Structure formats: structure tokens, C-alpha cells
Image (spheres, rainbow, N blue to C red):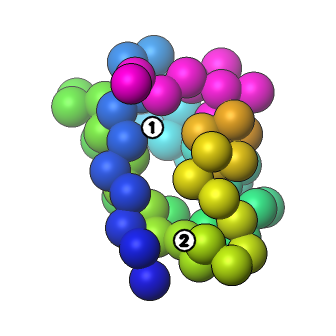
Amino acid sequence: MPRAVLEAPDISCDHCIMTIEKAVSNLGAQFVSGDPATKIVTLEYDPDVVSLEAIEAAMEEEGYPVKK
């Protein structure tokens, strides 16, 4: 299963991480870890179920755009 390491500069606390975890889990991605100090979220996803673009869009919808 592919792993994505995404930087989201607007992450500031554990609540942010929980919000992202819920958003990506609803899409079928598996949350692996998140760290407010580094602004990094790591997750695994099945590209046959959800695209990386859809995951990034869901994070942005929640207020946490991914740095490109």
C-alpha cells in the first residue's frame, strides 16, 4: 500500500491531527501518524479506493492545505 508523507503548514495541535485523521479515514485512507511540531502527516492509501489528490482535497476542505 502506498505511503504518503504530506506537509500541512497550518497544523498547530493534536485537534488538527484528529480532524485530518477523521477526514482521510472517511475516504478510505489509513492514518499512520501526525506531528504538529513538524507539520507532517503520514498515511497509507489504496489508489484503487482513493487518490492522493482526493486526500489532499479533503485536508484542504478541513482547513489544512498540503504544501506542494
Q: Quadrant of residue 33?
A: bottom left
> Label 1: how many residues lie within 10 Å, few (<14), some (14-19) or many (20+)?
few
Residue 50 position in % (x across, y down): 70, 65
- For residue 45, the mark is 2
Residue 62 position in % (x across, y down): 71, 28
> Compared with residue 43, is residue 53 higher up or lower down, i.e. above or below?
above
Quadrant where the image shows the C terminus: top left
Going from N to C along the chain, the mark reached first, 1 or 2, is: 1
- Amino acid type, residue under disc 2 in the picture: Tyr
Q: As rendered, which of 7 and 2 lies closer to the eye?
A: 2
Q: Which of marks 1 and 2 is in front?
A: 2
- Amino acid type, residue under disc 1 in the picture: Asp
> Compared with residue 60, is residue 3 higher up or lower down, i.e. above or below?
below
Q: What element carries label 1?
A: helix
In 3D space, how far apart are the residues under numbered discs 1 and 2 (Cα atoms)? 22 Å
Say whether residue 19 is visible.
Answer: no
Please tell me how many numbered marks the rendered image carries.
2
Find disc 1 in the rendering and name its residue: 14
Image position of 48 (left or right of 2): right
The residue at the point 53 percent across, 32 percent down is 16
Residue 65 position in % (x across, y down): 55, 23
- For residue 24, the mark is none
| Overall secondary structure of the magenta section | loop
Say whether residue 14 is visible.
Answer: yes
Magenta stretch: give its range: 59-68
The residue at the point 45 percent across, 16 percent down is 10
Q: Do the residues labelled 1 and 2 touch (CB within 8 Å)?
A: no
